[in-house]
Amino acid sequence: MLRVLTKITFTQRPTADFPNRKATIVFPFSHEYEVLTTWDTLTDDGSITLPRNVTVKAPDGTKYYLQNTTQNLGGFTNKAPVFLRGDKVKIEHGYAYYDARGNEVAPLSTIFEGYISQVTSKKPFVLKVEDNMWLLKQTPAAGLNDKTFFSRKKYTIEAVIRELFQNAGLPFTVNDLTNTTAGDFFTQNETIAEVLARLRKDYNFKSYFKGNELRIGSKVYIDSDLIDPKTKQKRIPPVFHFQKNIIEDSLDYQRKEDLTISAVARTTDEELTGKRTKDGHDKTKKVKLEVLITFANGSNTPTYFVAEKNKPIPPNTGGQRFDFVYPRGTTLEQLKTNATEELRLKYYTGLRGKFTTFGTPFVQFGDDVDLIDALLPEKNGRYRVKSVKYSGGVNGLRQEIELDFLINRLDANGKVIPNSK
C-alpha cells in the first residue's frame, strides 16, 4: 500500500517594507499543484493551490491561521505577509511504503525549486511559481564595458553569461554544452533573461536551469545525466506498460515510410559592403543562408534545396516542417550537416506524443524511458523525454511525460533491438 507524500517548503525573503520576513514554512499537503519542466521553454513554471481552512506552524513556533480571513496571506494589507512575490519555493513529493522488514520508507523526489512569481487573492489561495529564471528576469544585463564583446573570437557566449552572473553576484554556474561565438552581439537595456531569450530566438541557443546550473548551447541533453552517481553506470530506464501503469495517453504510432518531415535551416551573417557611414564606420549588409532538408518515403537519404535570390524556399505542402536557426559563421555545408543530424532524430518508426502515469517511477526530462505494449509489441521502444508535467494534491500524484525521439526499438521481451529506428 502506497501513501502519497507532499512537502512544499516556503522560505520568506525580507523586503524593505518587511525586513523581519525570514520564516520557513512547510506544507505537508496541498489542494493541488502543477509544474511543467522542459528544456523547450526558457522558464519552468507552475502553480500551487492552498486551502484557507488550515493552521500551519513554522519551525520557530509561529502559527499561521490561514482560515482567518484577516490573515495577510499575500501582502494585501499593511501586515507582514505570509507569502510574497520573490519568496523561495521547493516542492517535493513521493510515496511512503513498507519494506520487506516492515519498516516504513518515505523517499521524496524534488520536482521544483524556484520563486513565487505571483500571489493571487483567489479562493482557494493560488501561488504562481517560476524556477531560477525568475531571478534573471529581475536582473539587468550590466557590467560589460565592451558592447561588441561577442565579436572576440575567444570570448564565447557561454563566457559572457558566466560574466553576467558574476557581475550581478548571482550564485549560478554555467554548463557550456558548446563554446560558441556569434559575431557582433550588443546587449541592450534588457535583463539577463531577455538576453537568453534573444539568443534562443535568433541563434537557436537553448538555455534552461537544472538546479542552480544554467545550461546553454545548441545541445540540450547531457549524457552524464543518464549516469547513476552512485554506481557510475548508465541507469536502467524505467518501464511503462500500456496495460499496467499508463493511465491515459495521446500517443500516435507512425511508420517512417508514411512520414514526410522537413526543416528550414538558416543562418544570418554580415558582410562588409566596402562603403562607410557618415561617422566613419564600415557599412555591412545581411547575408542569409537557407536550406530545406526533407526526409520522405522511408528513405534515410535526405533531399536538399538551397534558397537563392530568385528561388526561395518552397511552401510546405505536406508533413511537419521545423525551423532551425544556427549561429553566424555557419557555412552551407555545416548548415546541411547540423540540420540533417537534428532532423534525423525526428524521423523514425514509433510513438509520438504524451502519456500520463503515476508518481512512480520518477522521471525527469532528459531521461530515457521504455514503453511496452503486450498486445502490440511493434509499439515497444526506448524514448528520450522532452518534458514532464508533475501534478499532485487531493487527486494523487501524476506525471504527464512528453516523448522527444526514439532511441531504440524494443522486442516483445523489452530487449533493445540494436541499430533499430
Image (cartoon, helix red, strand yellow):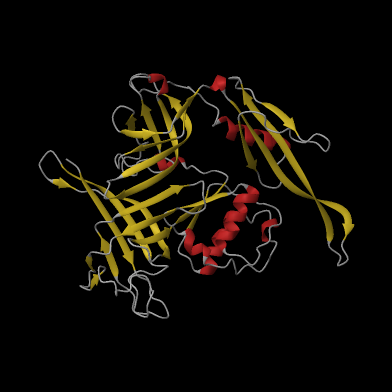
**Residue in view at x 38 percent, y 61 percent:** 127
| Relative depth, front residue between 117 and 414 | 117
Q: Quadrant of the N terminus?
A: top left
- 188 left or right of 421? right
Count the marks: 0
| Relative depth, front residue between 122 and 31 | 122
Residue 308's spot in the image, x, y percent? 80, 36
Residue 98's spot in the image, x, y percent? 14, 42
Above or below for 353 versus 415: below
**Residue in view at x 41 percent, y 59 percent:** 129
- Residue farthest to the left? 102
Residue 232's spot in the image, x, y percent? 35, 40
**Residue in view at x 47 percent, y 43 percent:** 222
**Residue in view at x 84 percent, y 59 percent:** 282
Is residue 237 something one can see in this rendering? no
Q: Quadrant of residue 362?
A: top left
Is residue 249 something one can see in this rendering? yes
Above or below for 123 versus 406: below
Q: Quadrant of residue 313?
A: top right
Residue 60's spot in the image, x, y percent? 22, 73
- 80 left or right of 65? right
| Relative depth, front residue between 128 and 41 | 128
